[in-house]
Image (cartoon, rainbow, N blue to C red):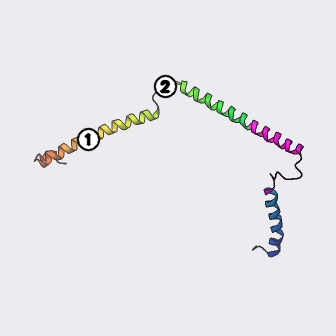
C-alpha cells in the first residue's frame, strides 16, 4: 500500500488537529480553564508531586538502610575486592620487576661470555 491521495487527504487534518490540540494543552488563555479548573489542575499536580516526593524519600531511605547494613556486615569490614586487586597488582608488579632484573642479568652475563646463562 503506497499511500493513496485520498487516505493522505483524510489523515492530514486529523494529524494536524492532534498536533494543535497537544500544543494548546497548557494554553493559559484557554477559555475553558475557569478559576475552578485551574485550582483543580493545581491540586492534582501538587498531589502528583507530593506522591512522587514520598516515593523518592521512601526509596532513598531503603537504599540508606541497605548501605548501612552492608557497611556494618563482616564482609564490608574485610578488605574489599578493590583492595585485594590492588594488592594482587602490586605483587604481580614486584614479580615482574624481579623477573626483568634476572633476565637483564642473564643477558649481561651471556654477552660477557657465560653461555650457560643464555637461553
Q: Which residue position is annotated with label 1?
A: 99
Q: Could you tell whether 118 is left or right of 84 in the image?
A: left
Q: Position of residue 68 (x, y in %)?
A: 58, 26
Q: Position of residue 102 (x, y in %)?
A: 21, 41
User: What numbered label is drawn on residue 81?
Assistant: none
Asked whether residue 32 is drawn in magenta, I would say yes
Q: Could you tell whether 105 is left or right of 91 in the image?
A: left
Q: Which residue position is annotated with label 2?
A: 77
Q: Closest to the observer: 80 or 37? A: 37
What's the residue at 42%, 33% (across, down)? 84
Q: Closest to the observer: 51 or 75? A: 51
User: Magenta residues, as a range?
Assistant: 23-51
Q: Position of residue 28 (x, y in %)?
A: 82, 51
* Cα distance between the residues tagged 2 and 1: 35 Å
Q: Is residue 21 above or below residue 60?
A: below
What's the residue at 81%, 56% (across, down)? 24
Asked whether residue 64 is drawn in magenta, I would say no
Secondary structure mostly seen in magenta is helix
Amino acid at each position: 500500500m503506497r499511500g493513496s491521495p485520498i487516505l493522505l487527504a483524510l489523515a492530514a487534518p486529523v494529524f494536524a488537529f492532534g498536533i494543535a490540540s497537544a500544543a494548546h494543552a497548557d494554553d493559559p488563555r484557554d477559555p475553558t480553564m475557569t478559576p475552578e479548573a485551574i485550582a483543580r489542575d493545581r491540586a492534582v499536580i501538587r498531589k502528583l508531586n507530593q506522591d512522587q516526593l514520598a516515593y523518592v524519600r521512601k526509596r532513598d531511605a531503603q537504599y540508606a538502610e541497605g548501605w548501612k547494613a552492608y557497611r556494618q556486615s563482616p564482609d564490608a569490614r574485610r578488605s574489599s575486592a578493590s583492595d585485594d586487586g590492588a594488592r594482587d597488582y602490586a605483587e604481580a608488579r614486584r614479580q615482574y620487576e624481579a623477573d626483568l632484573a634476572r633476565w637483564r642479568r642473564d643477558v649481561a652475563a651471556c654477552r660477557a661470555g657465560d653461555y650457560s646463562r643464555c637461553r
